[in-house]
Amino acid sequence: MNWVRIRELVRKEFIQLFRDKRVRPLLVISPIVQLIIFGYVVSTDVRDVTVAVMDQSKTVESRQFIDSINGNRTFRVVQYRENPGQIEDLLMRRKVDLVIKIPPRFSQTIRSGRTAVVQVLADGSMSNMASVRIAYLMNVIQQFNVRFLHELYPRKLSYGKIDARIRTWYNPNLDSRNFYVPGVVAFLIMLLTLLFTSMAVIREKESGTMEQLIVTPLKPIELILGKTIPYIIVVESQMVIVTLFAILWFHVPMKGSAPLLFAATCLFLLSTLGIGLFISTVSVTQQQAMMTTFFFAMPFFMLSGFVFPIGNMPEVIQWLTLLNPLRYLLVVIRGIFLKGVGFTILWPQFLGMAVIGVVVLGGAVSRFKKRLD
């Protein structure tokens, strides 16, 4: 293997990559723009929940109950209706997220020491958000119950109870951005590597320069290294950029080792480079290579645990996720960012990425031939 020939091919690849003025800004701006979009859009935090109220009681107690909901910064009462049909129409048209119906004998019931029933209607078309909104509302109702019970019975009630003192580690405020942004960084690395590598050989074939590379003394392994090294450098540079942007712009804590993160990314690139090379060997045009890339990217995304917990998937699918390198990188990135853990904890993920990377890249290299067909 001649490293001088590889160096010249790498230089040629960089020249070809940066020659197009339209591509230059995309190499830096594109991952930052995608990180900003994903960072702000992908969120499960509950904010500004709109509420409609049908108060059939119209008493001091019912107004206090409504004020306790409206006074919470998460909820905002935007509609008051008298007719049940109007209330349901608001929910159907998505004008509100929750509907609360207060019965006529609300005040008399609770003043007599009995439990008053309040109906809550939620828009279940987005089931995950509906469950979180209801949980938030139940917390507000519980706080109102405690205050109202203290008003009815001013004396101290010392019944047996369980008092939970909750403390959340690694993400104290439960900010979903701290959970999703590191995952976005991993997903961008995978997508960019697959696109760049799958296009590298196809572009040579379509531009007619593949014939010139064939007649050179370059060996197949030298050609592969020369075509992939530039994209490794570009993707690692983009990794540094988006990581710094995640820390400085989104204020995601970086508690672990940056060199360990860099090493994990390099291992992950073995898999994505191998898949990209495989795509380049089975594709004829750049359009076909791009479509094949997204064929691989979407299952990787869905089976990575980025959004959907792997533990909730069927057992067969859970075994299938073990073949997904993005699954391991997500654990590493979130562990380094949020927990600050080291190699002694993350070595199973490193081992998984190494095994998949060696097998996939080795198979792609063995399939790659220095010829046009």
Image: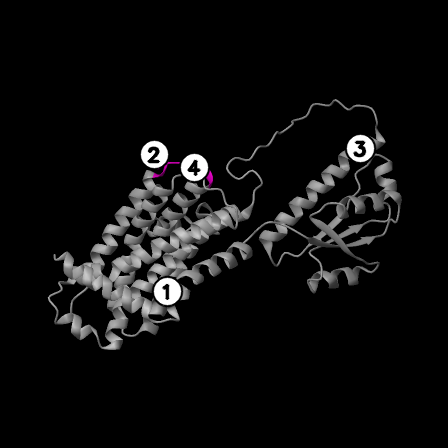
Q: Could you tell me if residue 313 is visible in this image?
A: no
As displayed, is residue 33 above or below residue 334?
A: below
Q: Amino acid at mark 1?
A: Phe
The label number, if any, that marks residue 340 in the structure image: 4
Q: Amino acid at mark 2?
A: Thr
Magenta stretch, residue numbers: 338-346
Q: Amino acid at mark 4?
A: Gly
As displayed, is residue 211 above or below residue 151?
A: below
Mark 4 and mark 1: Cα distance apart in space: 34 Å
Position of 341 with respect to 233 (left or right) is right
The picture places residue 103, in percent across and down from the top left corner, at: 82, 49
The picture places residue 106, in percent across and down from the top left corner, at: 84, 44
Mark 2 and mark 3: Cα distance apart in space: 52 Å
Q: The N terminus is located in which quarter?
A: bottom left
Report the residue at 44% width, 49% height from top. 244
Mark 4 and mark 2: Cα distance apart in space: 12 Å
Q: Are marks 4 and 1 in contact (CB under 8 Å)?
A: no
Q: Quadrant of residue 204?
A: bottom left
Q: Quadrant of residue 189?
A: bottom left
SS for dot 3: helix
Dominant secondary structure, magenta: helix
Report the residue at 28% width, 69% height from top. 16
Question: 60 or 106: nearer the eye?
Answer: 60
Assess disc 3: are there few (<14), some (14-19) or many (≥20) residues with their C-alpha within 10 Å of its C-alpha: some
Write down the residue under mark 3. 149
